[in-house]
Amino acid sequence: MTTKILKEGDFCKVITGIHKGKSGFVQDINTSKTGHITITVLQKNGLRFKTLGRSVEVIKED
């Protein structure tokens, strides 16, 4: 498995956690005080949710 650096606009799929199975576009990348990367994911239906960067994998859009 290769690790790709997240960038805004990448299409990703959540692979772990409460949002597992959801996908969308990466927005608003932040690093918390503890060093964890958090992102906002914009789904195709317009809804947004926040998740950890380690919980997603970048995929090619269908």
Image: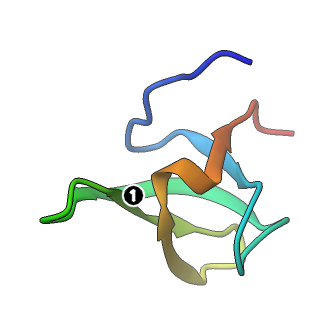
x, y percent for residue 14:
71, 58
Type of the residue with mark 1: Gln
* Residue drawn at (65%, 59%) of the image: 24
Residue sitting farthest toward the front = 34
Residue holding disc 1 = 27
Q: Vertically, is 23 above or below 54?
A: below
* Residue drawn at (23%, 58%) of the image: 30
Of 37 and 62, nearer the camera is 37
x, y percent for residue 7:
39, 36
Which image quarter is the C terminus in?
A: top right
Residue 31 in the figure: left or right of residue 48: left
* Color scheme of the displayed model: rainbow
Q: Quadrant of residue 38?
A: bottom left
* Residue drawn at (20%, 64%) of the image: 32
Which image quarter is the N terminus in?
A: top right
x, y percent for residue 21:
85, 65
Q: Secondary structure at mark 1?
A: strand
* Residue drawn at (53%, 80%) of the image: 49
Of 34 and 8, nearer the camera is 34
Q: Quadrant of residue 59?
A: top right
